[in-house]
Amino acid sequence: MNIEHFKNNNANIAIVYSDDKIIFDTQSALDMIMTVKYETDATKIVIDKNLICDEFFVLSTGIAGEIIQKFINYNFKVAVYGDYSQYTSKPLKDFIYESNNGNDLFFVASKEDAIQKLLNI
């Protein structure tokens, strides 16, 4: 896992990169946010959706809820970027819609959109 640190006068954002998936479960999500906090002191994270296990996007597994609860408990804001067009599940589409209208988790198309979203909260 590599972390690019983006900091200006009103934002402290970590952009996480990896060649492999890094979030598989609650513990791996917690490991990522604690690494980001330790290395950058950022509480806003941008991450490619390809770094998150596929089960996250199957809401019936419960993984998404558990991971999001960790983000909220530790006061992290997260923007996940990527292509969501292959998902046809109405519950997942509703979940993405509701997340994007909240304040903690966002699903956007590009890294630039993710950074912009976190700059505005």
Image (spheres, grey):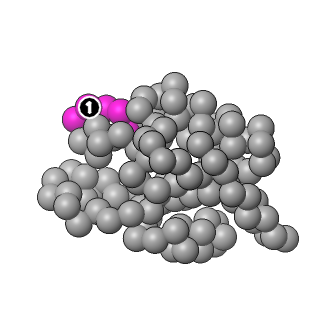
Q: Quadrant of residue 7?
A: bottom right
Side of 38 relative to 112 (left or right): right
Q: Residues within 10 Å of mark 1 (few under 14, many from 20)?
A: few
User: Residue, x 56% and y 52% (percent of image)?
Assistant: 17
User: Residue, x 35% and y 40% (percent of image)?
Assistant: 53
User: Residue, x 39% and y 51% (percent of image)?
Assistant: 50
State whether residue 21 is above or below residue 114. Answer: above
Q: Main secondary structure of the magenta part?
A: helix
Quadrant occupied by the C terminus: bottom right
Amino acid type, callout 1: Thr
Magenta residues, start to end: 60-64
State whether residue 15 is above or below residue 119. Answer: above
Is 62 contained in the magenta span? yes
Q: Quadrant of residue 71?
A: top right
Residue 31 % position (x, y): 60, 30
Could one spot residue 43 in this view of the protein?
yes
Depth order, front residue of 44/35: 35
Residue 97 % position (x, y): 34, 63
User: Residue, x 31% and y 53% (percent of image)?
Assistant: 95
State whether residue 112 is above or below residue 64. Answer: below
Is 106 contained in the magenta span? no
Which residue was labeled with disc 1? 61
Quadrant occupied by the N terminus: top right
Side of 28 relative to 41 (left or right): left
* Residue found farthest to the right: 9
Badge 1 marks a residue whose secondary structure is helix
Residue 5 % position (x, y): 73, 58
